[in-house]
Structures are given as C-alpha cells and as structure tokens.
Amino acid sequence: MMDNVMLAKALAIGIGSIAPALGIGFIGAKAMEAIGRNPEAAGKILVPMLLACAFAEAVAIYALVIAFSIK
C-alpha cells in the first residue's frame, strides 16, 4: 500500500511538472527570438515574459500541492 502512495506522489509531481517545464522553455525561446528581432523592445517583452513564466510555475506548484495531499 505504501509503495502505491509513493508511486502516486511521484507520478503527480512528475507528470505535473512536464507541461510547466515545456511552457517555460517555449516562453523563453519566443522571448529571446522576439528580442533578437527587435532589440529595442526588450523592456516591453521582459515583464510579460516573467508573468507568463510565473503562471506556468503556478501549475507546477499545484502539482506539488496535490502530490503532498495524496495520503
């Protein structure tokens, strides 16, 4: 029984962190691409990029909370 709980926790955080990791990677890649094309807009791109990264990280935190709540 204990092994199944540990497996469920591992799967919850493992699967729950894949999408935020991919999302942050795409956000960073597109932001760097946009700054490379238009360097003057770097200040305008930075804040929305950081906000999008924070929202993607929130999904990973939800997965962590769910992993901790599995009993």
Image (cartoon, grey):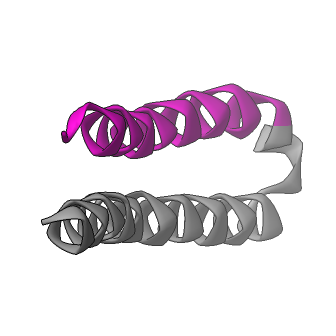
* Coordinates of residue 61 in the picture (x, y in percent): 44, 36
41 left or right, relative to 54: right
Q: Main secondary structure of the magenta part?
A: helix
26 left or right, relative to 18: right
Q: Quadrant of residue 50?
A: top right
Q: Position of residue 43 (x, y in %)?
A: 83, 31
Q: Position of residue 54 (x, y in %)?
A: 55, 32
Please determine whether, in this image, residue 46 is positioned above or below residue 16. Answer: above
- The residue under the point 40% across, 61% down is 17
> Is 55 contained in the magenta span?
yes
Start-end of magenta stretch: 43-71
Q: Give the x, y percent position of residue 19.
A: 33, 65
Q: Is residue 69 above or below residue 41?
A: above
Residue 70: image quadrant is top left
Q: Nearer the viewer, residue 13 or 33?
A: 13
Does the stretch in magenta take in 46?
Answer: yes
Q: Nearer the viewer, residue 55 or 26?
A: 55
- Picture layout, residue 63 above or below residue 36: above
Q: Residue at x 16, y 70 (%)?
A: 4
Mark count: 0
Residue drawn at the location 74% of the way across and 36% of the way down = 46
Q: Quadrant of the C terminus?
A: top left
The quadrant where residue 44 appears? top right
**Image point (42%, 32%), residue name:** 58
Q: In the rendered image, which quarter contains the N terminus?
A: bottom left
